[in-house]
Image (cartoon, rainbow, N blue to C red):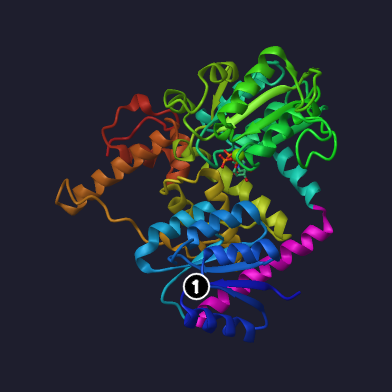
Amino acid sequence: MKLRILIVDDEAAIRDELAEALDDAGYETARAPDGAAAAALIAAEAFDLCVSDVRMPGMGGIELLRHVARTSPETLVLLMTAHAELQSAIEALRLGAVDYLQKPFKQEELLARVGRLAEHRKLVVENRNLRRSLESSVADRAAGIVGDSPAMRRVLEVVDRVASLPSNVLIVGESGTGKDLVAHALHERGSRAAAPFVPINCAAIPEALLEGELFGHVKGAFTGASDHKEGLLRTAGEGTIFLDELGELPLALQAKLLRALESREIQPIGSTRRVPIHARIVVATNRDLKADVRAGRFREDLYYRLAVVEIEVPPLRERAGDLPLLVDHLLARHARKLGRPAGRMAPEALRRLAGHDWRGNVRELSNVVERALIFARGDEIGVDELPDLFRSVAPRDPEGPIDLREATRAFERAHVLRIIEKCGGNKRQAARLLGLGPSSLYRKLGDAEPSLDDAAPTPSPR
Ligand SMILES: Nc1ncnc2c1ncn2[C@@H]1O[C@H](COP(=O)(O)OP(=O)(O)OP(=O)(O)O)[C@@H](O)[C@H]1O
Ligand SMILES: [Mg+2]
């Protein structure tokens, strides 16, 4: 199998140099001078990998990455960033880039990275052919939602309580927190599990087609309606319809959806007949719908009709206690995909991960874990296999005590308290993350109130 690589850079000399090096290494390459040209090429033919510059006139690398993640998720993206663009590199991993190279880099460095990615790609393809991807995605889903933090346990409790009810459910939370998983769990843990689960992403379908998709149409209702279509609200039968990215639903369709929810009937486009719907409605959004209501972008009456039950999936940074569990789960999942042993994350690497703010939530973590697995040589994944930003220690606030020992103690205490807070007060989890025994944790806290402690034995005087 010859890997197909698209090279995107606005500087012809760099583009040509990289393409020639990769050609010589036995890859098949194509070249594009900017994001828009690259997007057009990717739409026309399949690429395994896209190596792109970040800053280009017109459509830049980040925008291209966003586009590729949406339209061609199979294509891996490797970004080349200048030193000053570290922020965009972080953003890139969050958006799904598999890796980034910091400029200037040596050709061998590029070839080494591409070599690893090629190996990875080969494994994925081989495995996909062995076990059809459907099978593995079912296995993934059955593995369910991982999380043992107080915040996540509350979410799962609500899921179990409302799974079998007919009430509409609104799932909110930042991007990548696991809203899709919660929607699936609502279906699978409830009485509708045997009926269809029909997801539809309101942002991914052009407005002109969305109405027909949701409500159906008769043959010839509009140009292109060459056949009768039932409408997904009806296809879902007695099951669940999941309207994802609901915040993007145009106002006209919001009105129509509201009518359908109130009357439990829909009228396909071009039809005079109304047909009943029975499905349970679950919707999700990462937008602040209340703010959208205030701004007139979202109908208030529809909001209240949908938010009968509202489930808020907390951001990952508010449930750091889940991090070790999630890392294990994601290692196993990606390893299964690659058909190799999962290995484990070294304690120091885990600590570095725990210090990150995870704006891209579990999706970002999943990308970092997958990347680490690709670059891991042995069974244990160390700090060196993490992206650069985890390798440098962030500079600390210089205010506070001057004496080094006092400063160290103050820092330790503040850090321990911060991690305990992240773990929702669970000191056992905090100790595990910090790599401390319960009694040393207590010692680090110095004169902190003992009532906080739930795991440590009686403190011994220092
Ligand atoms: N608690 C969890 N346990 C296991 N995997 C998780 C968990 N939460 C999220 N994931 C994984 O993280 C990725 C992102 O999750 P998901 O697609 O559900 O996020 P989302 O909230 O729907 O994001 P978006 O708003 O971008 O649609 C998926 O691969 C999912 O399997
Ligand atoms: Mg989603």
Which corner quadrant of the image does residue 215 belong to? top right
Residue 447 visible somewhere in the drawing = yes
Q: Residues within 10 Å of mark 1 (few under 14, many from 20)?
A: many
Q: Is residue 231 magenta?
A: no
Q: Which residue corresponds to the image point at 71% horizontal and 21% vertical from the top-left?
A: 280
Q: Which residues are magenta?
A: 107-132
Which part of the image, by quadrant, shows the C terminus?
top left
The single residue placed furthest to the top in the displayed view is: 263
Q: Which residue corresponds to the image point at 51% horizontal and 28% vertical from the top-left?
A: 150
Taking depth in this image into account, of 62 and 141 the one nearest to the observer is: 62
Which part of the image, by quadrant, shows the N terminus?
bottom right
Taking depth in this image into account, of 369 and 167 the one nearest to the observer is: 167
Q: In the displayed structure, would residue 48 be above or below residue 253?
A: below
Q: Overall secondary structure of the magenta stretch?
A: helix
Residue matched to label 1? 9
Q: In the displayed structure, would residue 161 be above or below residue 85?
A: above
The single residue placed furthest to the left in the displayed view is: 402
Which corner quadrant of the image does residue 278 belong to? top right
At which x and y percent is residue 437?
44, 42
Q: Is residue 335 left or right of residue 34?
A: right
Q: Which residue corresponds to the image point at 66% horizontal and 17% vertical from the top-left?
A: 259
At which x and y percent is residue 256?
65, 22
**Amino acid, disc 1:** Asp
At which x and y percent is residue 231?
77, 30
Q: In the displayed structure, would residue 343 be above or below residue 202?
A: below
Taking depth in this image into account, of 370 and 179 the one nearest to the observer is: 179
Q: Is residue 317 left or right of residue 71?
A: left
Q: Is residue 125 magenta?
A: yes
At which x and y percent is residue 173?
51, 33
